[in-house]
Image (cartoon, grey):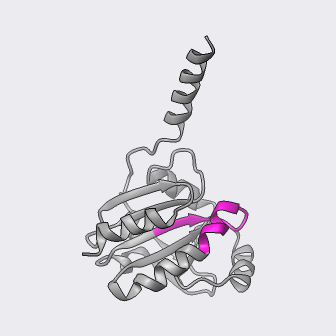
Amino acid sequence: MALAAAVVGGAVGWRRFQLAEPDLAGFWGQSFPAPDGASHRLATFRGRPLLVNFWATWCPPCVEEMPLLSRFYTENKANGMQLLGLAVDKPESVQRFLARLPVSFPVALAGVDGIELARQLGNTVGGLPFSILFDANGRLLERKLGPLNERDLSGWRAAVLV
């Protein structure tokens, strides 16, 4: 009986954290403010591979992966790789965070609307961090709910940089 309950519980948990089919309608037409007051239009990122990372300053796994993402971007931007951090957070919190721990990639402020955007991209539970990879043609290739690691990034780089 305990084994059956464990199997059912595992299946329910597994289904709960599965990513749904993404809805890309309108994605590339969106624009987000940057912490410095500039703006990031997603359309300007088309034409080269793009990794989008949804994160927040109050999310420990998000904060832990920021140095890894910054290093990845620095090592790969000359090859055409792009990275955009979409902060699901308050502008003041993001500004304070970036003053303490600057990153090499652009960051935009998605605010609470970022959770809805992440859901449209298949993150039905709205968890963070959530990362998505687009190829140079704007096709969604990869998605991951949870922190990225070196192995993920290496595989994703290989998928888009030939």
Residue 135 seen in the figure: no
Task: Return the x and y of residue 89 as percentages of the image width and height.
Answer: 67, 66
Task: Return the x and y of residue 48 as percentages of the image width and height.
Answer: 31, 78
Please indicate whether residue 35 sits to the left or right of residue 17 in the image: right
In the rendered image, residue 91 lying in the magenta stretch gets the answer no
In the rendered image, residue 64 lying in the magenta stretch gets the answer yes
The residue shown at (54%, 79%) is 70
Task: Return the x and y of residue 3 as percentages of the image width and height.
Answer: 58, 17
Count all numbered tags in the image, as a single digit. Answer: 0
Task: Return the x and y of residue 4 as percentages of the image width and height.
Answer: 56, 15
Q: Nearer the viewer, residue 128 or 11?
A: 11
The residue shown at (49%, 75%) is 84
Q: Quadrant of the N terminus?
A: top right
The picture quadrant where one finds residue 78 is bottom left
The picture quadrant where one finds residue 56 is bottom right
Q: Is residue 78 above or below residue 145?
A: below
Q: Is residue 141 above or below residue 42?
A: above
The residue shown at (69%, 82%) is 101
Q: Is residue 67 above or below residue 19?
A: below
Residue 58 seen in the figure: yes
Please indicate whether residue 110 sits to the left or right of residue 78 in the image: right
Among all residues in the image, which is located at the extreme top? 1
Which stretch is magenta?
A: 52-66
Q: Nearer the viewer, residue 49 or 115?
A: 49
Q: Nearer the viewer, residue 110 or 17?
A: 17
Q: Quadrant of the C terminus?
A: bottom left
The residue shown at (33%, 85%) is 79
